[in-house]
Image (tube, rainbow, N blue to C red):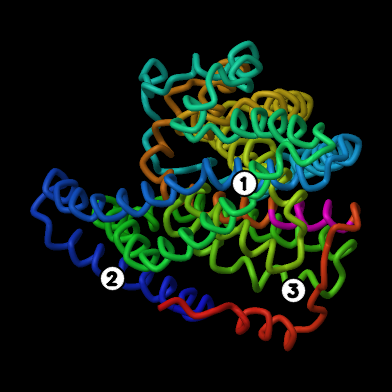
Amino acid sequence: MKKNKLTLYILVAMILGIVVGYFCNLNAPDAKAAKVIAGYFDIISSVFLRLIKMIIAPLVFGTIVSGIAGNGDSKAIGRIGIRAMGWFLCASVISLALGMVFVNLFQPGVGTSLPAPVAGATTNLNVAALNFKDFVTNIFPTSFLDAMAKNSILQILIFSVFFGFAIASFKDDATRTVVAFVKELVHIMLKVTDYVMQFAPVGVFAAMASCITVQGLGVLTTYGKFIGSFYIGLIVLWAVLIGAGYLFLRNSTWTLLKLIREPMLIAFSTASSEAAYPQTLESLERFGVKEKVSGFVLPLGYSFNLDGSMMYQAFAVIFIAQVYNIELSISKQIALLLVMMLTSKGMAGVARASLVVVAATLPMFNLPEAGLLLIMGIDQFLDMGRTATNVIGNSIATAVVAKWEGDLGQEAETEEEAELVLAAVPVQD
């Protein structure tokens, strides 16, 4: 199916999922029965996510190795990494700061009717998994096969960089066969991605139906102020990121946004960054980003440039303080921002990473970890927005770095040209 039609099908599937989930929620006799019904939808969405995860490791490996082996310039790769990390750092500060501004502006936790959990209640989150020592050591794989099996993007990236430079170090034709294999691997995995994405509407439908079956739409009313103010903050963050991208990409920014609308929808509906990775990579390549840049910056961004997640962390911590009527001074909030700047960089590979970062940060400022129980129940709705934001942030960052490097190919400067780019994608039988 055509890419533009697939986007429409995904959007329709989201709406149908909400309708079917709401119907199931209304007709379920109790919460336990609703979870059982949702479990059947989960089978479908889990299969789709597994198919996506099946693609990621070989795709990351192939794109990084082929990019480095084809370029062979260690200085260029180092320069790309430094530029990318500089952008990521600025984006992180802006995301955290905006989260703090909007939670203080709307004060969704002040005067709330939500019952504050007992301060000693536990969340059962593995906070111990988030520490500097483990983060640094876990960057480096003990086994390439283990990293591939666990889909540890950062570990795969490290091995792939070494492997790529090793290939590039040979000046003769000794590695010609390996280079050809890796490049062909990328093309094959992109074709596999096209096949898997034909199931995207079904997976999206099941994910939305499962979520609404358990939560219902009533939860949106109860937490309306919190969810609404958070999404307003995300919209402003989108505007800031797009504006920053426009400074460098100019009118082609709108082309980029058109090309990434499909991975954004997938990320939003499944609340999974992994689900959106293959399509994001394809969209960036259609935009004109060279493989050596997209294959390196995008995986790096998945570990260090989670803009939506960082805004959520600042928002959530201060919301919990508001619910418990604990005042945080400006100096404490600035300190909070600096702490989360560091702790958020250890999110890669940690289960329920954003919640874990919040849980780890709360005790540092004498805030009850139990407050996290207030938002764990609606985390799926929040995760959808922050995951889609991560896709936007990483796509713009990758395109801008490519522009800086002079590795951005032919760009479509108008909306009409963007439609031609989308229409040029071959039809899958």
| 401 lies left or right of 155 | right
Looking at this view, name the residue that lies furthest to the top: 133
Which numbered disc covers residue 254? 3
Magenta region includes residue 366? no
Q: Earlier in the sequence, mark 3 or mark 2?
A: 2
Residue 329 vertical placement versus 295 (above, below)? above
Work out whether residue 198 or residue 222 is closer to the camera in this orientation and state it. 198
> How dense is the environment of label 3, judged by Cα within 10 Å: few (below 14), some, or many (20 and up)?
some
Question: Is residue 319 at least partly visible in the picture?
Answer: yes
Q: Nearer the viewer, mark 1 or mark 3?
A: 1
- Residue type beneath disc 1: Val
| 377 lies left or right of 30 | right
Chief secondary structure of the magenta span? Answer: helix
Q: Which of marks 1 and 2 is in front?
A: 1
- The quadrant of the image that shows the C terminus is bottom left
From the image, tell me which residue sits under label 1.
182
Residue 128 vertical placement versus 260 (above, below)? above
> How dense is the environment of label 2, judged by Cα within 10 Å: few (below 14), some, or many (20 and up)?
some
From the image, tell me which residue sits under label 2.
19
- What span is colored magenta in the figure? 395-403
Label 1 vs label 3: CA separation?
Answer: 32 Å
The residue positioned 56% from the left and 22% from the top of the image is: 362
